[in-house]
Image (cartoon, rainbow, N blue to C red):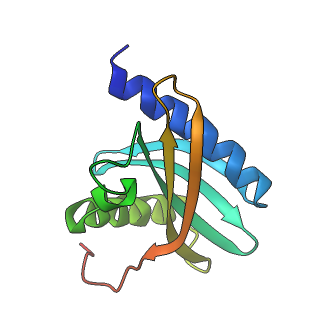
Amino acid sequence: MKDNKRLGDIGEKAAIEYLKKQGYRIIEINFKCKQGEIDIIAADNDTIVFVEVKTRSSDVYGQPSEAVNYYKQRKIVQVALVYLAQRKLFNWMSRFDIVEVITDHTDKIININLIKNAFEYNGKYGY
């Protein structure tokens, strides 16, 4: 397995456990459609939360969330719209969170940071 894939898997598992401890209910992991993929879909009370997990082995090149640029946000929103349409969840509130995971050189988790409502969908990414 490639190092980036392995590191990503470690980060996703850590993020899932962290979100559960924060009271999130995990609905789906790695939802895929032709538009892309969302790492974690969860419920936080009455809100559907689309979670992007970014894992890095250091923060030398900036915070992991900085990798979720405009284009990545647009793709996440497009996938989220597909998910909501497929599940007919039009009446649910939704939001986009990012979980940053930092590991050390032995893959031990040294920091997890949850950014709630990291970005918003304002309608301009629609089809």
Q: Residue at x 41, y 36 (%)?
A: 57
Please, is residue 22 above or below residue 7 in the view? Answer: below
- What is the residue that sits farthest to the bottom in this orientation? 122
Q: Quadrant of residue 67?
A: bottom left
In-image side of 41 versus 33 (left or right): right
Please, is residue 29 above or below residue 68 in the view? Answer: above
Q: Quadrant of residue 22?
A: bottom right
Q: Residue at x 49, y 32 (%)?
A: 104
Q: Residue at x 69, y 63 (%)?
A: 43
Task: Report x, y in % for residue 21.
Answer: 78, 53
Residue 63 vs residue 7, the one in the foreground: 63
Residue 120 vs residue 88, the one in the foreground: 120
Task: Report x, y in % for residue 40.
Answer: 54, 49
In-image side of 99 versus 91 (left or right): left
Task: Report x, y in % for residue 60.
Answer: 31, 47
Picture quarter with the C terminus: bottom left
Task: Report x, y in % for residue 95.
Answer: 52, 74
Q: Residue at x 72, y 75 (%)?
A: 46
